[in-house]
Amino acid sequence: MQFPKFLLGDNTDYPTAIFIIHAEYPRFILNLENDEVEWLEDFTAEDEKELSSEAESLIEAATTFYDREISRYED
């Protein structure tokens, strides 16, 4: 099964949180309520160096996805 790059998620145990799941490498979950990121990959020290430069653009893309999805609900 193929998944979209980003997915929206919520959970009744966290009623005020909205989660964005990045389903491609490097996989992560972004909690928009508090901007916490949970990485779903194990990284080496070398990977972490590369990831730090890429993380900002990935998180920006995730929030852009969220804004686009919300605007479609409003239309």
Image: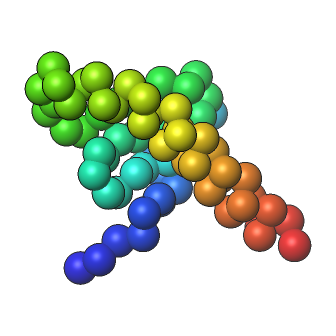
Q: Residue placed at 85% from the left, 65% from the top? A: 74
Does residue 10 show up?
A: no
Q: Residue placed at 17% from the left, 25% from the top? A: 46
Q: Residue placed at 87% from the left, 73% from the top? A: 75
| Image quarter in which the N terminus is found | bottom left
- On the picture, is 75 further left or further right than 50? right
Report how many numbered discs are placed on residues in the image. 0
Vertical order, 74 against 67 (above or below)? below
Residue 57 at x, y percent in the picture: 53, 40
Quadrant position of residue 2: bottom left
Near-viewer residue (58 or 15): 58
- On the picture, is 55 further left or further right than 23? right
Vertical order, 4 against 11 (above or below)? below
Residue 56 at x, y percent in the picture: 52, 32
Q: Residue placed at 80% from the left, 62% from the top? A: 71
Residue 66 at x, y percent in the picture: 65, 52
